[in-house]
Each structure stands twice: as structure tokens, then as C-alpha cells.
Image: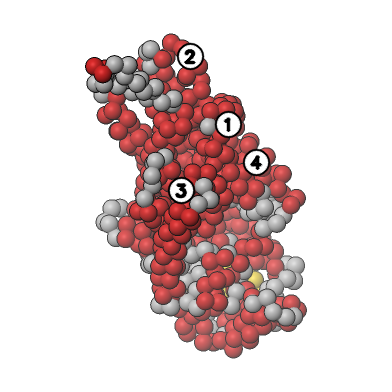
Amino acid sequence: MNNSLQRYAPLITSLFTLIIYLLTMSRGIMPIDAGELATSQYTLGISHPSGYPLFNILGFLWSKIPIGTVIFRLNLLCAIWVALANFFLVKTAFLILKNAFVPKPPVKKPTTKNATNAPSPQPKSLMLELIASISGILVLAFCRTWWIQSAGVEVYSLHIALLAVFFFVFLKTYYKSTPTFKDWIICGIFLGLCFTNHLTSFLILPGVVVLYFMKMKFTGPAFKSGLVMAAAFTGIFLLLYGFMMIRAGASPKVNWGDPENMEYMKRHVSGWQFQTFMGDDKKSNDTISTFFSNLSNESMIFGIILMLAGMIYGFMKNAKMSVFWAFHFLSCLLFAAQYSIHDIENYFLLAYMSAAIFMVFGVYWLLTSIKSLQKNVKPAWAMLILPLVPLALYYPKVDQSKIHYVDQYSISALNSVEKDAIILSWEWDVFISPCLYHQFIDHQRPDVLIIDKELLRRSWYFKQVKVWDPGFATKVEKQSNEFNEAVIPFERKQKHDPNFIQGKFEALIGAILNEYKNRPVYVSSLILDANISRGVDVKLPPNTLLVPDAYFYRLVPADTSKYYPLTNPLEFDINFTPDSKEDKFQRQILNFSMSVLSSRVGYEMYFKKMEEARKIFQLIQSVAPETPVPEGLYEK
């Protein structure tokens, strides 16, 4: 019975978490990168740095299974990855406790010739070790930061799954008395797979190297085995990133960075574009305090207590293994502390994983301290109540199954513009990224060209625009080529003139806006507020003005006497959550939408279209009732 339970308990634990994850999983597109990542998976494209070739290949294959919508399939895959991580973490925790914390039974030497066949000591049941492993990892499984990885498309779901598999394979090899070359090759393969999904996998290298040489010592065989592991790692790394380079040459619909040659490949894989987010010392302390605050809240404070107890116990009982996990914990926190992005919680995942292992140690210390449990382990199963607390508390906060505001907003905004429109936008998280999915997978409004103003600063981006709309690209190709010639020295870290680059950038945007003469051109509210109003980057062509439409501002000739009705009947069918004002992405949508609609009310009033103005204002008040009534709106 005990052996069967040890064999199947990790699987049962993983399936339990998967069921919860499926209940809370999003059925649509989540904010930030989900739309872009889903599109690059389905079309086998190139995602934002570092490209994530393994993530895209596995997603591409999975997305062809006819289950629900494409986004449902890919969200489901991410839930499976997180459940798989839980499975291997339970096995890893149990493996550590069994080998590093359980004292080996003494072997009695025979005292007489007749005693040579004396029975061996009975092995320990290991039930306390199993209970500690399950309860500690389940606390992790229902911490919000970990749980939310299962809710929608993101690379971190596969990242934590691969790390969990690697740790299990590596530690299983570590605990072998005489590991073979085959064992180290397998370790190298899984390490390579980790790196071909997310390059922050390098954070595990210090701990892995230290533990490796603690076991193998600095000997000839140790260096040979290390070279074998390194060779397997290098082979996997080059194979998958080589495939990414080849695939970029085919110009897929999503080809971020266009890494078809070594120059662009190096910049893309290294994340050069995002290095501006690194090195903010002022935010380092804030980031670390955010981590401990999040972990404390999500694990209901007892997680922190168990983690600290587990660290103490671990260093007392097995310093090597504790050093191994402490390296991962610290390297993750120190790296995240240097990264200044709004979704920094995703960079805490390795630290969460390490903290969970220490929680397991803490639970084990607690259980083994209760002497009565040595004879009767049944009461110890009560420890499984522990993870039910964060499960109950965070279920409504993590549940994305009925939240569709990103889909609703992005589709409504996309459908609000005229046929063959050009939209200059900066709203990646809730509009540009989701629309990649709507246009290239669901084939909604493929006639519309959406241009990301900030990505336009990169020399590769216009080639992507050319794939989407060759006719338009031809019209502004001269300005695009001139800008690329100016910006490439900057990208190569060569001598360059920032003012000259900025001038060419503004000329390129001007050429894009000048297309209003040939087809409808719209700009987003963020472009108006952050750029046009301040005279930065974007300047309107001569003799033009902006007319507020439903979700954007339309560029039209400067004739203040001409009235422009709404392009399409106004639809604002967006279901915000009760805590919408606390959610930064819903706040973005509210701010973007209300800005344009409020301007539209003023526009209608200017042309004495009071009935239309009142209808729009009533819609505004249904969403933002605190909005003040414009003067004269209800006067006769």
C-alpha cells in the first residue's frame, strides 16, 4: 500500500491541481503578451525576445488538436504545464527527503556463522516524507503568482515545468552512487530545453555547478562528465535556436526581431531591446520587498514561517542540498531586483519554487518533531488542510474563466474603424497584442493595419509591416529605408547621432499619417496624450485635425465646419469586473475609452447634436458614474 501511494501520490496531486486550474483558466485572451504568444505559436512564428523556440514548436503542434477555440487549446496547454511542474516538484521534494534527511538503517554484521542469513532491517515507511512533499508543493501550487501561470498563454508555464523536470533528473543522477555518461547526457538535454524556452534558466547554473562538483570533486572523470553534459546542452540549444533562425527567414506573420541572420539573432536572443529595463538600483529594494510581501500574503504567512524553519532545519541536516536551493533563491531575487517591468512577479517563479522546497523541509521538521507520528502517521495527513487555505482565499482572485474584457475591448475597438484603416497605437497590453490573434487566427478585420509606434523604432519592424500590408509599405518605403540607415548604427552600438535618428523617425511617422489622403487613419488616445499633445515623436500633417471616433481619433482635413459622424454605431459591450479600478489593465481600458468618448460628447455638442451627445454620455456614466456632466449638456 505504501509503495503504491508513493508511486501514485505525485500524479494524484498533479491531477488535483490541474482540475482546479481548468476551473479557473481563461477561455479567451489575457492581457500583455498572450495574444502575440498565441499567434506566434499557432503560426510557428518568432515571439518577443528571446524568441522561445521550444514554446512555439510545442504550442504549434498542440494547437492543431481540434479542441474548442485555438486560444482555449493554448490556455489549456499552459494549465497542463503548471500541473506537470507540480508533479515533478512533489517527486523532487520526496527524492530529497528520502535521500538527504532520512537516516539509513544500520546494517548489523553477523556474529556467528549461522547468522549470515539474518533478516535485513525493515525500511522506513517514508509516509511523513510523502506528506511533507505533497503539502509543501500544494501550498506553492495555490500561491497566486504560481497559480496564475496556468490561467492563460505565457512562456513561464513551460519554464517552470522544464525547471521542475530538470531538477528531478539532475538530483536523481546526483543521488546515484556511480552516475553514467548517459545520466549526465540526459541532464544536459533537459538543461538545454530549459534554455530554449527561457534564458533566465541561467539563474540555476551557480547552484547546479556547485552541487555537481560537491559530488564529483575536481577530478578527471568529473570534467569528462561535465563536458558530456555541456555537449548535450549545446546540441539542443543550437538545434532549436538554429530552427528559429531558419523559420525567421520564411517571414511568418509574427516575426519579432527578424532573427534570420547572426546579427539580428544575437540581439534577439540576448534581449538587447529590453536591456533598458535593467539596472534600476532605486527599485531593487522595492522589488525584493514585493516578493516577500507577495509570498507572505499568498501563502498566508505560515508559508514564510515554514520556509524559514525549513532553511534552518535544512542547513542543520544537509547543508549541501540547502546551499543548492539557497543559490537558486538568491540568484532569482538578485536578478529580479535589477529588472524594472510591471509584470515583475513572473520573474519570482524560481524563488517561489526554491521557497516551496524549504517549506517542505519545514513541514517535515514539524512532523518529525511530533513523536506520536512515528508510530501512527494518519494524523499527519491533516497537514494537507494547509494548502486549502490559499486555495479558498485566492480562487476568486485567480479565476479568469468568466473574464473577457480584453477580448471584448480589442474586438470592439478593431470593429469600430472603417475598412482598410491604419491605426497608429501604443496600447500593446490590451489592444495590439490581442489583435494579432483576432486578425491572424480568427481572421477578424484583416483589412486593418495596426502599427505599434514604439516597435517602429526598431530596424526589423517595418519588414514585418511589409508582410502584413505590402501595398502600404511600398508607399512609405523611402522614409522607412532612411530611418533604418540612421538607426542601424545605434543598434550595432556604433557612432550615431540621436537627433538625426529622431528626425528620421518623425519623418517615417509623418509619412504614415499622410496616408490619410488615401485611406482612413486613426491614432489611439495614448498617442494623442503622450505624444501629439506634447509635441513628442508624432506631429500631425499640415492642415489636419483629429476627430474623436468610438475608440480612436480619426485624422481628417482641417475643416471645422464639417461634421464627421461615428464610423460605425457605437458598441461598448465590455464586462468589467467589480474590482476594475484596482486592475491596471481594466483601468487602462477605462482611461483609453472614456478619454475618446468624453471628447466625442464635446464634439457632438459643438455641432449641436445634443441627442447624440446625451446618448454617449449616458453610456459613459453607466461605466464611470463619477464622470462630471458637461456644462450645457442637458440645457434646452
Where the N terminus falls, by quadrant?
Answer: top left
x 64%, y 71%: residue: 546
Let me know if residue 493 appears in the view: yes
Tag 2 and tag 4, C-beta contact below 8 Å: no
x 39%, y 22%: residue: 106
Occupied quadrant, residue 192:
bottom left
Q: Which of marks 1 and 3 is in front?
A: 1
Q: Where is residue 580 in the image (x, y as percent from the top left)?
A: 57, 43
Label 3 or label 2, whichever comes before in sequence order: 3
Please give the residue where the numbered disc 2 appears in the rendered image: 370
Image vertical order of residue 443 relative to residue 317, above or below: below
Tag 2 and tag 1, C-beta contact below 8 Å: no
Please give the residue where the numbered disc 3 appears in the rendered image: 163
Image vertical order of residue 186 relative to residue 254, above or below: above
Please give the residue where the numbered disc 1 appears in the rendered image: 315
Q: Which amino acid type is shown beneath numbered disc 1?
A: Phe
Name of the residue lying farthest toward the bottom: 478
Please give the residue where the numbered disc 4 appears in the rendered image: 290
Q: Position of residue 611 (x, y in %)?
A: 58, 57
